[in-house]
Amino acid sequence: MSLDGWRAEDHDRFRGAGSFARALTGLARLAEYELLPIVTATQNTDDEADALRERYLAVLRAAGLPRPRLKLLPMFRLGREVERTGGYSPADSLADLPPGAFDPTRLQCHSCRAVTSRGVFVCPLLVDEEGARMGERIDQALGPFELSHGACSTCYTTGMTCGNA
């Protein structure tokens, strides 16, 4: 489950009117069945991370999650965010980093793939991005992927990793 703001007006600006309320209703239903999802939330404000985390946690507790699990993610300049920010530039690439400057094994794309009805992609964030499709089947997507997409630079600069370890 993803939230793009701790207030309805912020989230709904990204996901559409009423989507914040529907997301919280869905989370409350999961909690009724004692399921504890990891809620991913974007840092789309200038708030300090600790303060923002507390705001999200308060909203999740109020929605009925007694022990919310929250992962804060940076805003990736993908999808509708391209219209607001202009997206990534060609300079936003890790392809030319010197050897040893970055440990790619920290990223989910090193050992995981996103399998969809449209094929296998290097990263769930890049399913709609050109060049991220690695093949039709998982056996075609087992090799390395050059970290040349702009979103890879967001992971690098923020120290972000998708893994839950």
Image: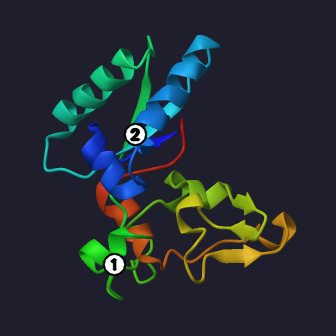
Q: In percent of the image, x 40 and y 39: which residue is there?
A: 20
| Secondary structure state at the residue bearing disc 1 | loop
Crowding at label 1, few (<14), some or many (≥20) Cα neighbours within 10 Å?
some
Residue beneath disc 1? 87
**Total number of numbered labels?**
2
Q: In percent of the image, x 23 and y 29: which residue is there?
A: 55
Q: Are marks 1 and 2 in contact (CB under 8 Å)?
A: no
Q: Quadrant of residue 146?
A: bottom right
Coloring scheme used: rainbow
Closest to the observer: 149 or 36?
A: 36
Q: Quadrant of the C terminus?
A: top right
| Left or right: 9, with 22 as reference point | left
Q: Earlier in the sequence, mark 1 or mark 2?
A: 2
Between label 1 and label 2, give the one nearer the viewer: 2
Position of residue 98 relative to residue 75, above or below, is: below
The picture places residue 134, in percent across and down from the top left corner, at 71, 76
The picture places residue 43, in percent across and down from the top left corner, at 27, 48
Question: Which amino acid type is shown beneath numbered disc 1?
Answer: Gly
Closest to the observer: 31 or 161?
A: 31
Q: Quadrant of residue 153?
A: bottom left
The picture places residue 14, in percent across and down from the top left corner, at 36, 57
Crowding at label 2, few (<14), some or many (≥20) Cα neighbours within 10 Å?
many
Question: Which amino acid type is shown beneath numbered disc 2?
Answer: Phe
| Secondary structure state at the residue bearing disc 2 | helix
Q: In percent of the image, x 68 and y 76: which residue is there?
A: 133
Closest to the observer: 48 or 29?
A: 29
Mark on residue 20?
Answer: 2
Distance of label 1 from label 2 (alpha carbons): 25 Å
Q: Quadrant of residue 66?
A: top left
Position of residue 148 relative to residue 75, above or below, is: below
